[in-house]
Every structure is written in structure tokens, then in C-alpha cells.
Amino acid sequence: MREANHKRSGRLSDFLSYGLYTLSMLIFGTNGILVAHISISASQIVLLRTLLGGAALTLIVLLRGGFDRAAIRAEFVPLLLGGAALGANWVALFEAFRMLNVSLATLIYYVGPMLILLLSPLLFGEKLCRAKITALCLVAVGLVCISGSIAFGGLSASGLVVAILSALFYAALICFNKRIVQTGGMQTAAIELDAAFVVVLLYVLLTAGFPRPAKADLPYIAVIGLVNTGLAYVMYFSGLQKLPGQSVALISYVDPVSTLLFSALLLHEALTPLQLLGAVLIIGGALYGELRGRKTRDE
């Protein structure tokens, strides 16, 4: 009886972990929808998002026992640089949402992890297996499809540049976070959000000025800060800590796929056949490289 209860408890815990992680990905997939309903600039949205989300996560970490000061001191530089990359990443992405559209900006943004894969032999001394090379080729062709459709479809070329910048900052964020091994995931998220707030605050004060959101903006700002950042990060790390790596890789792509679906249903964005091909190549190639590459390492 005790063994049966233990197995049942384990299955329930696994189900909860999968559910929390999947739900966090779905919540992240609504960011573009919220940004579309907020009138202030992209950098101002990120400023308020990092303020609310960072404050919420910092409070949670303090209630759970506080920060590991020794680990933070040892990893202060990558934590600070990771926060700066996070803030710049979101500013560029949210700006790309408006200059292109949510769907195309998201697809280009998800080239970021493939850039890390491409540079992994130089950055981390990792070898590129055949599966990863195939994945890189698929994603590259997908990016060409997306870029070509933008160039010849009358869309913003500067929007394409900003979206590529968001992918570069995303890659930088991944790179810095791979250097963080002692500081816990929740603490890392809180510190990086707080660091991102400081960096974006300086940028906003020098450019757009302190935000003055309209009354209609406030509910969307509250959701993107407290729900899509604070709550979603809690669920993200709660699931991440208990799931196998392959499951994490697979479920992570719920984010871009749900973004495409939400933008089509709620913002009425439509992808051309060439853009749809690019979407399949980018998401499918990245997913193939992650899963097949991991399997090759395990064999």
C-alpha cells in the first residue's frame, strides 16, 4: 500500500511539473499579444516588466530563505552581463513585434539558440555532430525564407535588423547563463531581472524618458509584469528543476508555436507560404538539433 501511494504521488508530481512548465511556455507565448495593446514604447514596457517581475521574484526568493551571497559573489559578472543581455533582448524583441509583427519577430528571435550551437566549438569546446550541423542548415534556410519574404514583401528592413539583434542578445543571454552554475535558477532569474531593470532604466532615461502609460495600458502592464514574468518564471523553474532535459527541450517549443497561433487568432496575423516554410524549418530544425544532438551525446 505504501509503495502504491509512493508511485501515485510520484506520478502526480511528474504531472504537475509537466503542467507547470507547459503552462509557463503558453504564458510566454502571449507576450506579443500584450505588447500590441500597450501604447508606450518597447523600452518603457520592458522597464515596467522588469520592475514588476524582478520585485515579485526577489520577494519570493527572500521568503524562501534569501539569496546565496557566496555564489552570487563568485558569479557576479555573468549574472550582471546576463541581466544586461536580458533587458536588451526584450527591448529589441518588443520593438521587432511592432516594426514587423509578432509572428515574424518570434521566428527570427528563435534563431538565437542556433547561434550558440554554431559557436559552441569556440565558446564551450563542444563538437558539432552531424545532427547539429543538419539542424543549423535547416534553420539557416528557414531564416533565408523569412528574410527574403520581408525584403521582397514590403515589410520593414530595419525591423528585420532589430529582430536579428534580439536573436543575438538571446544568444548572449544563453552564453552568460551557461557560466552560472552555483546560483540557483530562481535566484538567477531574480538577480538578472533586477539587473535588467537598472540597465533598461538608464537606456530609457537617455532615450524615451520615464514611462507615462495610459489608463488603458495598466491592466496589460500588470499582466506582463506580474503574470507573464513573475508567476510564469516561478512555474518555469518549478517544472524545470524536475523534468528530464529532453522533455524540457521539447516543451520549450510550445512558446514559439503558441505565439504563432495566438497572433493568428487574436491579432489576425497571417504568414505567407514562404514564411510558413521558414517557420517549419526554424522551429523544426532547432527542435531536431536539440533532441537528436542530445541523443547522440547520450549514446
Image (spheres, rainbow, N blue to C red):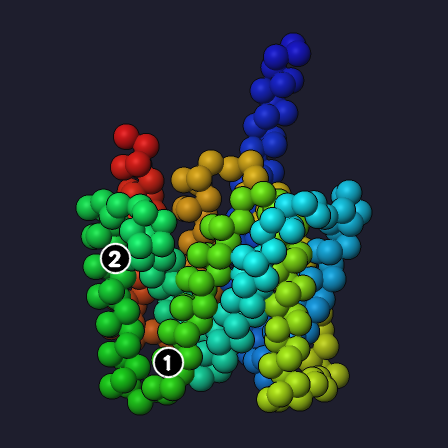
Q: What residue type is disc 1 on? A: Val
**Residue at 63%, 18% in the rendered image:** 6
From this view, report whether residue 143 is shown above or below residue 176. Answer: below
- Left or right of residue 9, residue 144 in this image: left
**Residue at 69%, 84% in the rendered image:** 211
Total marks in image:
2
Residue nearest the viewer, comparing 124 with 14? 124
Residue 246 location (% of width, % of height): 41, 40
Give me the C-alpha separation between circle 1 and circle 2: 20 Å
Residue linked to disc 2:
136
Give whichever of discs 1 and 2 has the lower sequence position.
Answer: 2
Question: In which quadrant is the C terminus drawn?
Answer: top left
Task: Write down the quadrant of residue 154 in the picture.
Answer: bottom left
Circle 1 SS class: helix
Residue 205 location (% of width, % of height): 66, 85
Contact flag, marks 1 and 2 (Cβ < 8 Å): no
From this view, report whether residue 219 is shown above or below residue 297. Answer: below
Residue linked to disc 1:
161
**Residue at 33%, 40% in the rendered image:** 294
**Residue at 59%, 84% in the rendered image:** 41
Residue nearest the viewer, comparing 120 with 17? 120
Task: Write down the quadrant of residue 256 in the picture.
Answer: bottom left
- Left or right of residue 153, residue 107 in this image: right
Question: In which quadrant is the N terminus drawn?
Answer: top right
Residue 74 visible in image? yes
Residue 114 location (% of width, % of height): 33, 58
